[in-house]
Image (cartoon, helix red, strand yellow):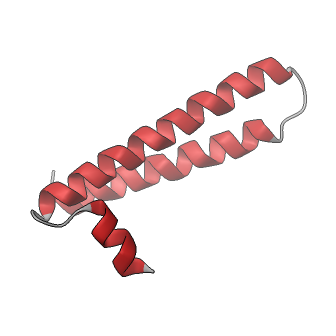
Amino acid sequence: MNLSHQLAELLAGIERADAQARGHDGANGDRDHHAEAAQRADEAAEAGRKAARTLIEGAFPGISWSMIERASL
């Protein structure tokens, strides 16, 4: 699997997890269940972000994530 495909899959997973978290944050019903599900989705999204950062930094040796963030501002 090439780098762009891996990154696309990671970004899609982050988007799905963020959408799940938002859905649970605004859901009616069992508040504890939705809070726990939102937390799990947030954790999955953050794990995806970390994996994406690692993938990008590995593809561009000498370039850190903070350098990329500053350049994007």
Res 58 quadrant in image: bottom left
Q: Residue at x 38, y 70 (%)?
A: 69
Q: Is residue 33 left or right of residue 59?
A: right
Q: Is residue 34 above or below residue 52?
A: above
In the rendered image, residue 30, in percent from the top left (x then y), is placed at 86, 20
Residue placed most toward the observer, 62 or 2: 62
In the rendered image, residue 25, in percent from the top left (x then y), is placed at 77, 39
Res 31 quadrant in image: top right
Q: Is residue 65 left or right of residue 69?
A: left
In the rendered image, residue 32, in percent from the top left (x then y), is placed at 79, 19
Q: How many marks?
A: 0
Q: Is residue 49 above or below residue 37?
A: below
In the rendered image, residue 59, in percent from the top left (x then y), is placed at 13, 61
Q: Is residue 64 above or below residue 33?
A: below
- The quadrant the C terminus occupies is bottom left
Res 36 quadrant in image: top right
Q: Residue at x 41, y 38 (%)?
A: 47
Q: Residue at x 36, y 50 (%)?
A: 10
Q: Is residue 54 above or below residue 8?
A: above
- From this viewpoint, which residue is outermost toward the left? 61
Q: Is residue 46 left or right of residue 19?
A: left
- From this viewpoint, which residue is outermost toward the right? 28
